[in-house]
Image (tube, rainbow, N blue to C red):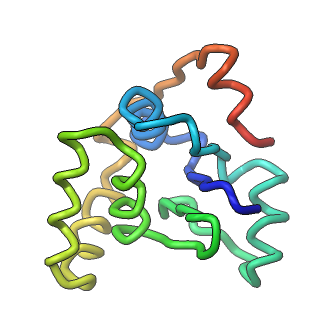
């Protein structure tokens, strides 16, 4: 699989809002999406040697490598339009600090955004893997 894929917790409102944000601000329609609860995600992660996925973790397959947490989020910025690409300045921050901030948000993600489920357009729906 050489296309980029965002793996997210399908039961998390914050995660679903993040997916909607990417859909609304991406440069092109290259990214595919998959809830961690889907069979595709389970099979994909097994092929990567990962048996237990962490539902509180955001994963991004860039076409060659599976990234997680803050690194995954920063890599997604490459696929967004300006001005969101300016967020790449986050790379100057050491990973342990970025991931510390990520952890703080992930721990509160269910409170930050209640359940949210947007209906994708038919074209967008075709990019969701099951």
Instruction: Please tell me which residue lies in front, 111 or 119.
Output: 119
Image quadrant occupied by the N terminus: bottom right
**Residue in the image at 41% along x and 55% along y:** 76
Instruction: Please tell me which residue lies in front, 51 or 73.
Output: 73
User: Residue 82 location in percent, x, y?
Assistant: 23, 40
Q: Quadrant of residue 49?
A: bottom right
Q: How many labels does the image show?
A: 0
Image quadrant occupied by the C terminus: top right
For residue 103, above or below residue 35: below
User: Residue 53 location in percent, x, y?
Assistant: 65, 69
For residue 73, above or below residue 85: below
Report whether 76 appears left or right of 10. left
**Residue in the image at 50% along x and 41% along y:** 12
User: Residue 92 location in percent, x, y?
Assistant: 15, 77
Instruction: Please tell me which residue lies in front, 106 or 128.
Output: 128
**Residue in the image at 31% along x and 39% along y:** 81
For residue 69, above or below residue 111: below
**Residue in the image at 67% along x and 46% along y:** 34
Q: Quadrant of residue 125?
A: top right
């Amino acid at each position: 699989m050489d296309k980029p894929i965002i793996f997210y917790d399908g039961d998390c409102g914050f995660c679903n809002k993040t997916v909607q944000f990417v859909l609304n601000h991406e440069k092109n329609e290259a990214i595919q999406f998959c809830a961690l609860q889907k069979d595709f995600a389970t099979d994909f992660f097994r092929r990567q040697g990962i048996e237990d996925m962490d539902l509180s973790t955001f994963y991004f397959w860039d076409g060659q490598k599976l990234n997680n947490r803050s690194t995954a989020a920063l890599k997604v910025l490459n696929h967004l339009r300006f001005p969101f690409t300016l967020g790449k300045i986050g790379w100057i921050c050491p990973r342990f600090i970025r991931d510390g901030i990520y952890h703080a948000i992930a721990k509160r993600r269910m409170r930050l955004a209640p359940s949210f489920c947007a209906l994708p357009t038919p074209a967008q729906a075709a990019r969701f893997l099951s």
